[in-house]
Amino acid sequence: MTRAMVCALVVSAVFTAACQGAADQATTDTTTSKMTSTTSEDTMAERDNTPTTDARTDPRSTPSPIVAAPSSTAVDRPDGPAADMSEPLTGGAGVFMGEPLTTDLGPAGYTEHEYVAAGTATSYASSERTPDGRWTFTPDGAAPYRTRVLVRTPADPDDFSGTVVLEWLNVSGGADANPEWAGIHEEVLRQGHVWVGVSAQMIGVMGGPVLVRTNSPGSENAGLGLRAIDPERYGTLDHPGDGFAFDIYTQVARAVRSGAGLAMMSPRVLVAAGESQSAFALVTYYNGVQPVTQAFDGFFVHSRGGVAMALVGPGEAADLAGAIGRGGPTTFRDDQSAPVFDLQTEGDVTGILSSYVARQPDHDRFRLWEVAGTAHFDQHLLGASAEHIDCGYPINNGPLEVVAKAGFRALVTWIETGTPPVEAPRIELTTDASPAIARDADGIALGGIRTPPVDVPVATLSGEPGPDAALACILFGMTTAFSVERIAELYPSRAEYEKRYAASTDHVIEQGFVLAVDRSRLLGYAEPSAVGP
């Protein structure tokens, strides 16, 4: 029997997340996933052999002269407890996951399994949390936990690349969601990586307050947590609070590195990944926990704010509103071996997230890519949920997901070979006391990574909300079509527009910010119908 899971589009006072899950009740929960809806972009049966981005250079910037040793082989990992992942999760209504985009795993040669991760986790106390991120974490309390881990692996172990992506699932919408999978799943599938979603935070398991709701289908599940959403399947789970989330994440990483849940596959590389609230958590993890555990070989941090997630007491959920209001700017420490790839949208740089306050120079273990014309959430990440959103204007439709896949490929190459990703120019800011994005006459951001929709435009793509934006729309950006007259000024014919767009596509591929295999995807963002013949 198949049930379409409904994970609400729910918005907190600080963050928004939209998700529409799908799950199937099969005769067993260790068979190939059979999602109820499929997007054509999600079926990737062939592995990609296109050159990695380290072979390319950016004429606008100078790549790092330092080629560091591969981090996956240069670090001695301290011993520590690993999660027990021997108990599968079965029954009930099947897997529940906030899926902005659902994926038919079978045709891609993948299977899905779900497990309890159990153990005793440690919370941490911190030294003064200085802006440079060089913090000292020491063990504080201890508490038992039973959380959920979702694992997606190649069906044939011979197809496994050796790389595992551990996504810290996002709970900003009041339920576990996987926005990182939504952004990079095509790269994961075509390379043969394993993806692991970790229910690291308390709200995803136990539930918690949702400050602002929408009326999207499934919103009644927001804030309930897995235990209440499906007691038959998840009723034995228990989470001691977000102060323990960091060690829970570590213990799952140790278990996965040892092969737990991977059906005889042996990982070589473990990448920590998280978007939005989860990215805040990874800043804290990298600065305080990674130096103690060395659990990960690299970090893919997507849409962080200028501050880090705070530590909280037993039974408490993370207070991001308080962190933004009271926390100071926090950079990534620069004395660790595991590289950090920081992907930021235009909408993240200023406004409520203000990641610009935590900008730092690129170095042999850090890269920052800021992408012009993109928003914290966009039409791609929202998937089918976008049709339930009425901001009074079209939300952002920038091609962030195309750049994200190139960034992730570059990070894995960096870990494996020591060759860093190409450096990227920063988005330009005004010199005001409270800086804003510097824009051209059409309102398009200056600087940053440039994709064809911003360099060969027929609309203004902005990461900022429109006028009088509702709370649910503050992170969705907007798309403002050019007038017919403005388009005629820019392009004498549709053929000329298509020629320029294709040339811009090839240019950004040559720079290393988009993969050659994604050329057709980026071309798909063109709008030739907006230009007269």
Image: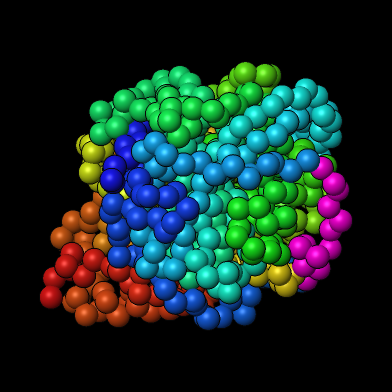
For residue 532: magenta?
Answer: no
Residue depicted at x 29% and y 32%: 218
The residue at the far front in this view is 27
Above or below: residue 461 compared with residue 410: above
Q: Nearer the viewer, residue 509 or 4?
A: 4
In this orientation, does residue 67 appear?
yes
Above or below: residue 258 compared with residue 170: below
Residue depicted at x 58% and y 23%: 317
Horizontal arrangement in the rendering, residue 454 relative to residue 117 (left or right): left
Q: Nearer the viewer, residue 81 or 433?
A: 81
Q: Quadrant of the C terminus?
A: bottom left
Residue depicted at x 46% and y 59%: 111
How many tags in the picture? 0
Question: Quadrant of the rendered structure where residue 500 is?
Answer: bottom left
Above or below: residue 83 compared with residue 415: above
In this orientation, does residue 405 appear?
no
Residue depicted at x 46% and y 41%: 90
Q: Main secondary structure of the magenta part?
A: loop
Question: What stretch of residues is rendered in magenta?
Answer: 67-80
Residue 271 drawn at (x, y percent): 65, 55
Q: Quadrant of the N terminus?
A: top left
Name the colour scheme.
rainbow
Residue 400 drawn at (x, y percent): 43, 57
Question: Quadrant of the rendered structure where residue 424 is?
Answer: bottom right
Question: Quadrant of the rendered structure where residue 251 is?
Answer: top right
Horizontal arrangement in the rendering, residue 222 relative to residue 416 (left or right): left
For residue 68: magenta?
Answer: yes
Residue 469 drawn at (x, y percent): 31, 32
